[in-house]
Amino acid sequence: MKKILVIGACGQIGSELTPALRKIYGNNNVVAADCLYPLKGELVDSGPSCKIDATQIEDIATTVKQYNIDTIYNLAAILSAKAEANPMLGWEVGVGAVLNCLEVAREFHCQLFTPSSIGAFGTGTPPDNTPQDTIQRPKTIYGVTKVTGELLSDYYFKRFGVDTRSVRYPGLISNITLPGGGTTDYAVDIYYSAIRNGKFTCPLRQGTFMDMMYMPDALRAAIDIMEADSTKLIHRNSFNVTAMSFDPEMIATEIKKHIPNFTMDYQIDELRQGIADSWPNSMDDSCARAEWDWKPDYDLVSMTEDMITVLREKLL
Ligand code: NAD
Ligand code: AKB
């Protein structure tokens, strides 16, 4: 049985990935860690937890030794818009934490998952059907850290044999923990606003297409790639994965099918708009499909149905 450490367990992904991993590998075999401490709720009640500041290598090494960890999910992050407000912090967490995890993984022979993002693309990247292997010249500090993380992870695999694996997540939509300050956050906020107020002010322009994915698919991607047969992996860091591509009008139209009086207006956030414009409209994830059988379950229609059902129960 794996002994897993999740760093950044309180975030949008970690708060759902940790319970999902505990269900598969056993509650006591999955340690939840975050720099936000004490952790709360299910993360503490259903298994071991501790404080880790991932920019401090000793914090990670001590926990790995204490719990005999053999698998690390490193989810510590400062997302795209938030990192633009504090590039130094973006770099310290986006690269410092990755390098620390890689070093600990090398020393203690751990498998390591560090997500990349559509943010790893930018100027010169083909925006439609973006290939797996293509130009990566991001214009955000977040993107610079993601490309660096991909390169470092491949380096540690080739140079030291560390079993590093990763996916380039698109914008993730979920209903447990709100997103942490990214460019794709609007696609979560719109559901909360629709249920609470019946209206939404969109920070991105009509016609801004980006890849997106519902959280259950994102969790499965993280678990499946770590379980994939390594002999079949041609790529490692990182695989394009996507489930859908839409613009604000398309998601609003889908929501209106459930909330007919829903209305949306626009107030453009130029920072986020500039970032979104530099990211792909839609990615080609055929390498993930071929090398480890990646296939999403949810599209815009089924995700919206589920989001609205869950949020109605949660918020009303
Ligand atoms: P999030 O912002 O919701 O959560 C990040 C967590 O990391 C937070 O709980 C935060 O407290 C913790 N953290 C920050 N600095 C830390 C440190 N120094 N030490 C320990 N913990 C620290 O992020 P998320 O959305 O859960 O993202 C997780 C990973 O997935 C990141 O690598 C992110 O870039 C990537 N990703 C996320 C999305 C998305 O839409 N959510 C999309 C693409 C990629
Ligand atoms: C962000 O918008 O910063 C994240 C991401 C796509 O990496 N959601």
Image (cartoon, rainbow, N blue to C red):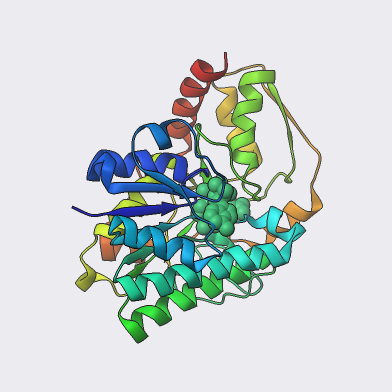
Is residue 201 shown to the viewer in this render?
Answer: yes
Where residue 223 appears, as percent x and y from the top left, is: 31, 52
Where residue 60 appears, as percent x and y from the top left, is: 44, 62
**Total marks drawn?**
0
Instruction: State which quadrant residue 164 falls in.
Output: bottom left
Give the side of residue 33 with respect to residue 275, left or right. Answer: left
Q: Residue at x 73, y 60 (%)?
A: 84
Q: Residue furthest top?
A: 316
Q: Nearer the viewer, residue 127 or 12?
A: 12
Give the side of residue 277 with respect to residue 238, left or right. Answer: right
Q: Is residue 13 above or below residue 129?
A: above
Q: Residue at x 74, y 60 (%)?
A: 86
Where residue 116 appears, as percent x and y from the top left, is: 49, 63
Is residue 171 shown to the viewer in this render?
Answer: no
Q: Residue at x 69, y 19 (%)?
A: 197
Q: Nearer the viewer, residue 239 or 149?
A: 149
Where residue 64 appears, as percent x and y from the top left, is: 35, 61
Instruction: State which quadrant residue 190 falls in.
Output: top right
Q: Is residue 286 above or below residue 161?
A: above
Q: Is residue 283 above or below residue 152?
A: above
Give the side of residue 28 with respect to residue 146, left or right. Answer: left
